[in-house]
Image (cartoon, rainbow, N blue to C red):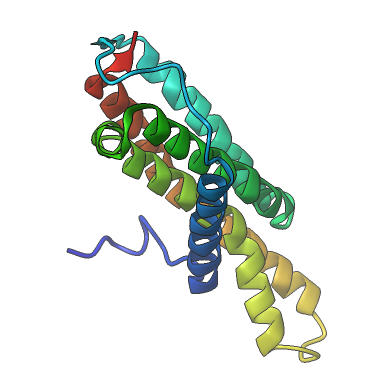
Amino acid sequence: MRLPRLLLPRLPRGAWILASAAMLGFVTVGWLASAHATFPISQDQGTHHPWSMVWQIFARNAGAALVLFAGVATGGIATVASIPVLGMYIGTVIRATSNSIGMYAASEILATYFILEFIGLTLAAVCGLSPLIASVSWWRRHRGGERSWRRELLSLYLESAGRALRWMALAALALLLGAWLEVLGGIPR
């Protein structure tokens, strides 16, 4: 089933490739750089389901997503600067969790919600880079052509920003569902 283009219009392929590869790359760097990191948790530690924390978790993740999305307003600079920090943080958290309770237990805990949160954050990065990538692609195709290239380029940038904003709603939904699943899976006491 294809969603109508009006609801979720196309984003530049280059933004998908660049944001996804950068996020995965920096998660890997964070993982490799934190070989001895641990958390003060254990496998037999009890968990609880504080449903009031769903909104706190969502707010933290949404804040990170908005920093990634800020690339729309900064010509991609905020997104490019944020991806390494966020990616290495995520990689470090995964490594510290697996060092503390073992890879199997960590994957059992993290798999319930981490995939959705990672998708939501990566989608926010794609959205933050989309206007820049669309503008650069247009510029490469139309170099030195029209007299009113500035107006057309600005129009394209703003149109791409509007498309990215619609995708951010999907990113927010993924982050909210991820926060709900994180609490459902249990928070260590």
Question: Image quarter for residue 58?
Answer: top left
Relative vertical location of residue 62 with respect to residue 185 in this rendering, above or below: below
Residue at the outermost front position: 36
Q: Is residue 179 left or right of residue 90?
A: left
| Residue 108 x, y percent position in the rendering | 23, 35
Q: Is residue 81 left or right of residue 15?
A: right
| Residue 19 x, y percent position in the rendering | 54, 60
Q: Residue at x 72, y 66 (%)?
A: 154
Q: Quadrant of the C terminus?
A: top left
Using the rendered image of the protein, determine whether residue 159 is visible from the camera's viewpoint.
no
Residue nearer the viewer, 60 or 170: 60
Residue nearer the viewer, 94 or 118: 94
Question: Image quarter for residue 1?
Answer: bottom left
Relative vertical location of residue 29 with respect to residue 150 in this rendering, above or below: above
Q: Residue at x 27, y 21 (%)?
A: 43
Using the rendered image of the protein, determine whether residue 12 is visible from the camera's viewpoint.
yes
Q: Is residue 21 left or right of residue 116?
A: right
Q: Residue at x 79, y 73 (%)?
A: 150
Q: Is residue 66 left or right of residue 99?
A: right
Q: Residue at x 41, y 33 (%)?
A: 99
| Residue 85 x, y percent position in the rendering | 64, 43
Count of numbered marks:
0
Residue nearer the viewer, 66 or 22: 22
Residue at the outermost bottom position: 145
Relative vertical location of residue 116 with respect to residue 11 in this rendering, above or below: above
